[in-house]
Image (tube, rainbow, N blue to C red):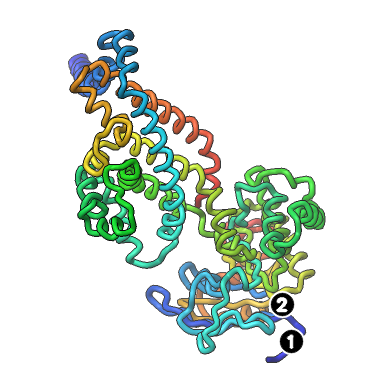
Amino acid sequence: MKRAAGSRASSGRLYNAAMVGLGGVLLLFLVLPFVALVFDGGPEAIWRGLGCALTWPALRLSLATTLISVALVVLGGTPLAWWLARSRWRSARWLEILLQLPVVIPPAVGGIALLLAFGRRGLFGEALERLGWTPAFSVVAVVMAQVFVSAPFYLQAAVQAFGRLDPSLLAVARSLGASPPRLFLRVALPLARPWLIGGAAMSWARALGEFGATLMFAGNMTGKTQTLPLAIYTALELDIHTAQALSLLLVVFAFALLLFLRRFNRGAETTRRLATS
Amino acid sequence: MIETCVPRLSVAVQAALGPFSLQASLEVGAEPLALVGPNGSGKTSLLLAILGLRTPDRGRIVLSDEILFDTALAIDRPTEERHLAYLPQDFGLFPHLTVVDNVAFALACRSESASPKQRCALAMTWLDRFAIGHLAKRNPSQLSGGERQRVALARALASSPKALLLDEPTASLDVEARVEVRAFLADSIRSLGLPTILVTHDVMDVEALASRIAVLEKGQVVACGLLHDVRAAPPTSFARRLLSSPTVPGTGPICTQGVHHN
């Protein structure tokens, strides 16, 4: 009896040690880089890094382009998601999968694809050039690259949000005489709003971090197409503490976003339960 | 076109429905019709077809002198133009709107011209008519089952419907509320005089709310007539089991769930 109890206790200890050990190693691995990012070099080096000539143009460009990108994604993505969620066509399901492609392909591939499509010698680039418009390697290209890589995040959230709405609520609204615009604006949009905002926030985070496609399609020109992630890449060749300072800026944005989403999700929980079947 | 003074809903539709096909004809006048049938018999599909949310392969749906759907004439009026009041099982109140705004929503759908203020005032008179004016500023989540149903009915009537479709109106309520809701619904249906179709599983609903009954099985109407007549000669074992449950109307035992009180 005693031995059985003892062996049970020791197997319990082994279990605990294994769980804590394995989980702890991963935890350390994930946390240590952040520790280094915050503490390496001390505040003075970081402060000096922030004062670098790359910082403010990149920060300004990043904020301006990502806000425009998210606005464009929401503006076009909301109607597209509403249509996708309600379509009974089989082709709509295929389109949904196709639209998720930018999430899983490497951003560099997205950059090449954009270049082949809208670049000066691209498939549609020549036609665009005849119209007097060459988007590649301009601030427009920065926005295009961001929209390309970030739109799927919003679309996925929005399609799910609209798809999960209680069909009987939509049926009642229509039976009461709601026209399609009223159904969309007064019923579907307010009910889906918590998920739409969550999707837009994720999409913004992705746009802010966009690197590969921007580099390929828009280039890395300080003050013109150099967003924060590209500035980090450039700064790395000059001074690691500048790169560190710029990175910290992005971490601050990301962290603020996570806090916002957590708060927001808690508030939205009740609406969420009521709006879906 | 024939002018009719008594409002009338006539439905004859055919639609593929999983393993079998829905092939149903119904006529509803001033006497409410209960539509009963086992799960998967096509009740919901029939209701959705009448509402215009599901397109039948063939058929004709006429409400009084208005053709809502006719495959031969290629008429298929959209749901919002059919003027049908639809009350789903959980009443379908909009959770993001207050009670008064739920009713005002229906008014806004039918009259773009009125100002929001006028609509709100009119919505209040609808609520007062159903003795629920005091709930105006509440959210639907704060209401009891019985209250929710009153709001849903007030909202449905505010859209000036020409027929009433009820989907299991008591199924989501507890036993106490069922008795109250049934009595209220019976009064309302009688005083409205609109063609009414009531989908239900509950023989108590049938007895309290309908005078005629249609039994749907595997997409076919196997019996249709006065409740008394169908009960006297039930065509199938389902109809016999449903209608032979011993009940005293209005007292509340829920016999379809196998609970017997004396």
The answer for which chain carries disc 1 is B
Query: Residue B99: where, in percent of width, then height?
Result: 70, 49
The reply to whether residue A4 is in sight is: no
Eyeballing the image, is A253 above or below B168? above
Q: Quadrant of the N terminus of chain A?
A: top left
The reply to whether residue A108 is in sight is: yes
The answer for which chain carries disc 2 is B
Asked whether, in this view, residue B231 is left or right of residue B160, the answer is left
Q: Residue at x 34, y 44 (%)?
A: A140
Query: Residue B23: where, in percent of width, then height?
Result: 49, 82
Instruction: State how far apart marks 1 and 2 are (Cα).
Output: 15 Å
**Res A173 label:** none
Q: Residue at x 59, y 59 (%)?
A: A182
Q: Mark 2 sits on what residue?
A: B31
Give amino acid for label 2: Glu
Give amino acid for label 1: Thr
Asked whether, in this view, residue B169 is left or right of residue A276, the answer is right
Q: Residue at x 59, y 78 (%)?
A: B214
Q: Secondary structure at mark 1?
A: loop
Q: Quadrant of residue A122?
A: bottom left
Query: Which of the pair A234/B73 is nearer the observer?
Result: A234
Query: Residue B235: where, in percent of width, then height?
Result: 54, 82
Q: Secondary structure at mark 2?
A: loop
Asked whether, in this view, residue B197 is left or right of residue A262, the answer is right
How packed mark 1 is, by other alpha carbons closer than 10 Å (few <14, some 14-19, many 20 or more), is few
Foreground mark, 1 or 2? 1
Query: Which of the pair B62/B186 is nearer the observer?
Result: B62
Q: Mark 1 sits on what residue?
A: B4
Q: Point out the tag, 1 or 2, that comes first from the N-terminus.
A: 1
Q: Residue at x 79, y 45 (%)?
A: B134
